């Protein structure tokens, strides 16, 4: 675990927290840690001194008493947008001579020889005039001035793209909109003895950011609820379409009969799919490890698909056949020689560099006395069979001029993308903790 890894209270039950816990289990490292300290990189201007275990910055000079004295520092890490909401607070320990203090955020490319907000890709709220500065040297009226003893907070809501500030626990309203991307908390000073301490969440905040986070989470729940209501009207059609699309014809017909019985309506059987039975046979054969029989069916029905120049399907099936032979050899003595001989034939067929790399990984299972229990055991698992069977089914559908996925699968994939990546608001929702805890 990185030494700087921590979670502020408002993020402790978040989707970001769950991702961090999973990453620690997998690798012992967090790929996107939160800002925790002020950076002491060599680009920090010499007129500034970072102290207080890298939580304080002081303007020590020398100074020329002009804008050219301005200097800034950044945090040690960018803010991960996946956290959904980010907040930090700064205590003004001393306004120094003039209190030309700026608090905000910037991108990594911004020079540190200006106050936050004065340059492109930087944003700031300044204490001497209460103005907000959005990537330019001219500010706008925003909030009250701040001085010695004040605590100024800065928040970015990645769901809405908005930034707001607080002063001594009071929300000052939205300062900036359209905010996103990789951003670093930033503090700028300009006159002698200005002194600021930053709190990234290691200590309690003055502003009740936990309550604000809960409010945002409630809004996200409402959005998810609306989506669920919209989908619920089509659940039966989606499930029926999924079954038929993926070759589970009998199950689809049984569902149609069940729905008709429950709703006292006529049976609405799914459209006839003449290929469904064969596709389901191919899936079943791959699922039980009989790749030869699956290839025979595919060759008989969709030979052109297997032998398309750009297709890797035949290569993947042949690699799976090799793995099935190794799997059988682990259970029955005397069959390993056959697997090796087949592997050598694959090397002769696929001699180009890209295939050689894939074959090398596949053949690596032979290096272990017990391949099933080896670090490469996943190659021999039932999950591997299932993934290949699904891939083959999708390839057949596409080759036949149909969609690779059913409508239901598209809905699920869309929701997954919303929770994980494309919809920032979903970062407020920890699916397992918020929805599945009671079930599990």
Image (cartoon, rainbow, N blue to C red):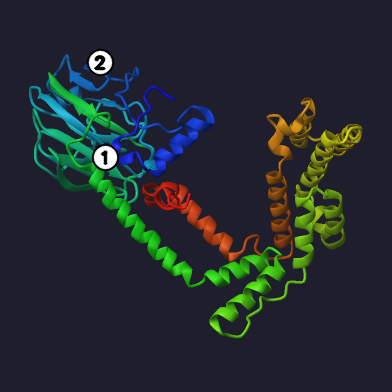
Instruction: Residue under label 1, please give it.
Output: 135
Query: Residue at image x 76%, y 33%?
Result: 353
Task: Using the image, tell me which numbered label, if any, was put on residue 46.
Answer: 2
Q: Secondary structure at mark 2?
A: loop
Relative height, residue 147 to residue 217 (above, below): above
Q: Quadrant of residue 339?
A: top right
Q: Are marks 2 and 1 in contact (CB under 8 Å)?
A: no
The picture places residue 360, in percent across and down from the top left corner, at 77, 31
Neighbour tally class for label 1: few under 14, some 14-19, many 20 plus, Cα within 10 Å: some
What distance separates the C-alpha of mark 2 from that of mark 1?
Answer: 24 Å
Secondary element at tag 1: loop
Q: Which of the 4 image quarters holds residue 251?
A: bottom right
* Quarter of the view holding residue 104: top left
Q: Nearer the viewer, residue 395 or 389?
A: 389
Considering the image in quadrants, where does the N terminus appear? top left
Q: Position of residue 145 (x, y in %)?
A: 9, 37
């Amino acid at each position: 675990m990185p030494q700087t890894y921590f979670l502020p209270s408002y993020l402790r039950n978040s989707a970001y927290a769950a991702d961090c816990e999973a990453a620690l289990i997998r690798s012992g490292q967090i790929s996107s840690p939160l800002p925790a300290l002020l950076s002491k990189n060599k680009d920090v201007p010499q007129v500034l001194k970072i102290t207080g275990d890298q939580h304080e910055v002081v303007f020590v000079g020398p100074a020329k008493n002009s804008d050219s004295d301005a200097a800034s520092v950044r945090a040690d890490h960018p803010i991960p947008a996946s956290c959904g909401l980010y907040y930090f607070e700064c205590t003004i320990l001393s306004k120094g001579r003039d209190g030309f203090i700026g608090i905000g955020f910037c991108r990594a490319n911004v020079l540190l020889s200006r106050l936050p907000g004065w340059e492109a890709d930087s944003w700031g709220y300044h204490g001497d005039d209460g103005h907000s500065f959005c990537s330019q040297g001219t500010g706008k009226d925003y909030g009250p001035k701040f001085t010695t003893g004040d605590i100024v907070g800065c928040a970015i809501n990645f769901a809405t793209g908005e930034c707001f500030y607080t002063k001594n626990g009071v929300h000052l309203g939205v300062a900036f909109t359209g905010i996103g991307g990789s951003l670093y908390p930033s503090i700028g000073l300009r006159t002698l003895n200005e002194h600021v301490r930053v709190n990234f969440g290691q200590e309690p905040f003055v502003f009740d950011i936990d309550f604000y986070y809960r409010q945002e989470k409630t809004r996200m729940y409402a959005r998810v609820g609306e989506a669920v209501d919209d989908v619920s009207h089509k659940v039966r059609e989606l499930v029926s379409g999924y079954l038929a699309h993926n070759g589970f014809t009998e199950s689809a017909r049984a569902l149609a009969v069940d729905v008709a019985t429950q709703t006292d309506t006529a049976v609405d059987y799914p459209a006839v799919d003449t290929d469904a039975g064969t596709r389901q046979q191919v899936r079943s054969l791959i699922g039980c490890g009989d790749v030869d029989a699956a290839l025979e069916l595919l060759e008989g029905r969709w030979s052109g698909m297997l032998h398309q120049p750009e297709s890797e399907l035949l290569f993947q099936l042949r690699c799976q056949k090799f793995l099935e032979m190794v799997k059988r050899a682990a259970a029955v003595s005397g069959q390993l020689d056959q697997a090796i001989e087949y592997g050598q034939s694959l090397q002769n067929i696929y001699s180009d560099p890209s295939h050689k790399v894939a074959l090398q990984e596949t053949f690596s299972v032979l290096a272990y006395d017990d391949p099933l229990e080896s670090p490469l055991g996943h190659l021999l698992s039932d999950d591997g069979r299932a993934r290949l069977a699904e891939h083959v089914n999708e390839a057949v559908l596409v080759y036949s001029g149909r969609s690779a996925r059913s409508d239901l699968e598209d809905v699920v994939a869309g929701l997954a993308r919303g929770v994980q990546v494309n919809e920032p608001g979903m970062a407020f929702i920890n699916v397992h903790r918020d929805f599945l805890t009671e079930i599990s």
